[in-house]
Image: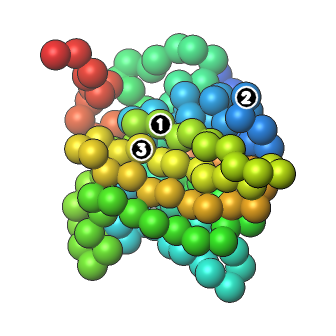
Amino acid sequence: MTDARFEDAGGGPLNLGAMDPEDLQVLSALLQDAVLTAGDISWQKRHRRLALLVNRVRREDGVHTVPPERVRALVSVENVQAVASQGVARGDGETVLSLLSVQFEPGEEGAGFVVFTLAGDGALRAQVEALELRLRDVTRPYRAVSGKLPDHEG
């Protein structure tokens, strides 16, 4: 089995940022159905950064490849003051978490919360001084192990 190549797909690796809620909607759509483990989540308090290493479904250009492809991507949230989680076992680095959406809950003067909603009532919530999120592909695409896209029906 050979890995897919960026050259064979439409477009190269993504390196995108979100500084407002509209930009974040685009990143949220690209991150829908990304998977990760609790071990792939890093709260870097000293650097005020929350980082997630995810396996995201390649959906750029609105075209789904057959078989579907995934790519490892780094998602970083900057200006983080605090992080809370629900339904994420911190000591369990093996349980697979599925990302449903990323949203911004605004507060006062540009501050607020970046909320990662996970399947099964899980969530990560980062309190931020200002919205600044980055998505950057860090590996070449590969064929999804399951060979199919996630199914949200029924």
Q: Amino acid at mark 2?
A: Glu
**The N terminus, quarter of image:** top left
Picture layout, residue 47 above or below residue 113: below
Q: Tell me the quarter of the picture where residue 70 sits.
A: top left
In-image side of 49 versus 151 (left or right): right
Q: CA distance from mark 2 to mark 1?
A: 14 Å
Q: Position of residue 88 (x, y in %)?
A: 30, 63
Residue that appears at 57% across and 39% down: 103
* 3D distance between C-alphas at marks 3 and 2: 17 Å
Q: Please provide percent x and percent y for residue 97.
A: 31, 52
Q: Earlier in the sequence, mark 3 or mark 1?
A: 1
39, above or below 3, in the image: below
Which residue is pictured at 23% across the width and 61% down the height? 95
Proximity of marks 2 and 1: CB atoms separated by less than 8 Å: no
Q: Secondary structure at mark 1?
A: strand
The reply to whether dot 3 and dot 1 touch (C-beta < 8 Å) is yes
> Which mark, by number, is residue 101?
1
* Residue at position x 69%, y 61% in the image: 128
Q: Which residue is mark 2?
A: 22
Residue ID at (75%, 42%): 18
Mark 3 element type: strand
Q: Secondary structure at mark 2?
A: helix
> Looking at numbered disc 3 in the image, what kind of residue is underneath it?
Thr
